[in-house]
Image: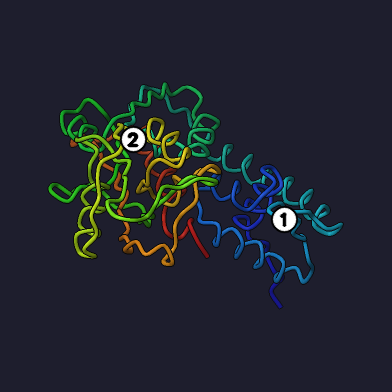
């Protein structure tokens, strides 16, 4: 009989929950949905045949068995990372320029950390901008790679992940949902979310107005948190200060957008190839759910 094997991805989820203290925070760290994190924890418990946690409000408390398993998980993941680093130890050097919208940067936190551990001699420069501008810079060979929202007019790129869009309001405050809806929108040049919102509201016969505008959530977030406007974001962009509205809000459903990886037309450098592999592994549908 073949001996059972622990799934390292489930162990990594367990460690993320322990480090962050909640399923919500672990989902943000891993760029998963909350339901994916919960399902992965349940799968791990099922495979072990023991309860690893108990809920205390929004936080997670580990059982005695959970604490023991957490110690095993940390050692196994450390050994896994050490083995991968050793096997990939061939010296990789050079410069690498990556473009990414500011609001997606958090999706790559773990990727950046892992890339630096594997390839410490590569100089990585990250440029933030709108998806449209970053794609143009890749085409002009100013950037090696760009991870962006896939555009309708000039799609291109390799689709890495689909991200559902949601209407979001402040955690504790929200505006009236009566027409005209006050919307916090991205500035022109970063307007795919606006197009999607306009189409959904028009199809539902709803009226709206532009209440606030910014290039990123850094500008829109405080306004939405204060209860002055509604914003359209991907689920991975939700922060602890925001909450998604569900179908009971009366607002129309929104589609998903695609995250695409664009690469310069020239032959990719070794650092670019390695980073593209890590991004694909971290954000692919297989990595994002069971």
255 versus 112 height, above or below: below
- How many marks on residues? 2
Q: Residue at x 45, y 33 (%)?
A: 222
Assess whether mark 1 and mark 2 are in contact (beta carbons under 8 angstroms).
no
50 versus 229 height, above or below: below
Residue density around tag 1, few if under 14, some if 14–19, many if 20 or more, within 10 Å: few
Q: Which residue is drawn at 76% across and 51% down?
A: 70
Closer to the eye: label 2 or 1: 1
Residue 241 in percent (x, y) is at: 53, 42
Residue 53 in percent (x, y) is at: 76, 60
Is residue 60 rendered to the left or right of residue 144? right
Which SS class for mark 2? loop
**Residue that mark 1 sits on:** 57
Using the image as rendered, state which of residue 91 and residue 285 is in the foreground. Answer: 285
Residue density around tag 2, few if under 14, some if 14–19, many if 20 or more, within 10 Å: many
Is residue 197 rendered to the left or right of residue 166? left
For marks 2 and 1 on the same chain, the one whose residue lies earlier in the sequence:
1
Is residue 68 rendered to the left or right of residue 3? right
Q: Residue at x 24, y 34 (%)?
A: 187
Is residue 31 rendered to the left or right of residue 149? right
177 versus 138 height, above or below: below
Q: Residue at x 20, y 64 (%)?
A: 203
Instruction: Residue at the far bottom: name it.
Output: 1
Q: Name the quadrant of the N terminus.
A: bottom right
Which SS class for mark 1? loop
**Residue that mark 2 sits on:** 101
Using the image as rendered, state which of residue 180 and residue 43 is in the foreground. Answer: 180
Using the image as rendered, state which of residue 99 and residue 243 is in the foreground. Answer: 243
Residue 141 in percent (x, y) is at: 19, 28
* Res 3 → quadrant: bottom right
Instruction: Residue at the far left: name it.
Output: 153
């Amino acid at each position: 009989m073949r001996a059972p094997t622990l799934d390292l991805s489930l162990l990594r989820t367990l460690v993320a929950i322990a480090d962050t203290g909640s399923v919500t925070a672990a989902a943000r760290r891993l760029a998963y949905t909350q339901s994916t994190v919960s399902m992965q924890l349940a799968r791990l418990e099922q495979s072990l045949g023991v309860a690893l946690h108990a809920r205390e409000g929004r936080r997670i408390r580990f059982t005695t068995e959970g604490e023991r398993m957490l110690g095993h998980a940390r050692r196994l993941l450390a050994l896994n990372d050490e083995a991968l680093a050793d096997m990939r130890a061939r010296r990789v050097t050079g410069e690498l320029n990556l473009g990414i919208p500011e609001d997606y940067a958090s999706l790559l936190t773990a990727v950046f950390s892992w890339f630096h551990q594997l390839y410490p001699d590569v100089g990585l420069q990250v440029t933030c901008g709108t998806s449209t501008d970053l794609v143009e810079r890749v085409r002009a060979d100013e950037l090696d790679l760009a991870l962006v929202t896939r555009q309708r007019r000039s799609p291109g790129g390799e689709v890495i992940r689909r991200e559902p869009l949601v209407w979001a309001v402040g955690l504790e405050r929200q505006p009236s949902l009566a027409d005209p809806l006050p919307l916090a929108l991205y500035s022109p040049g970063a307007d795919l979310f606006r197009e999607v919102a306009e189409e959904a509201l028009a199809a539902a016969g709803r009226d709206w107005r532009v209440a606030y505008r910014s290039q990123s959530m850094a500008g829109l977030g405080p306004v939405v948190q204060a209860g002055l406007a509604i914003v359209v974001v991907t689920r991975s962009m939700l922060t602890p200060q925001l909450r998604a509205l569900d179908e009971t809000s009366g607002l129309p459903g929104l589609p998903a957008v695609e995250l695409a990886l664009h690469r310069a037309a020239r032959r990719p450098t070794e650092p670019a190839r390695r980073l593209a592999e890590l991004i694909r592994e971290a954000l692919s549908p297989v990595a994002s759910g069971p």
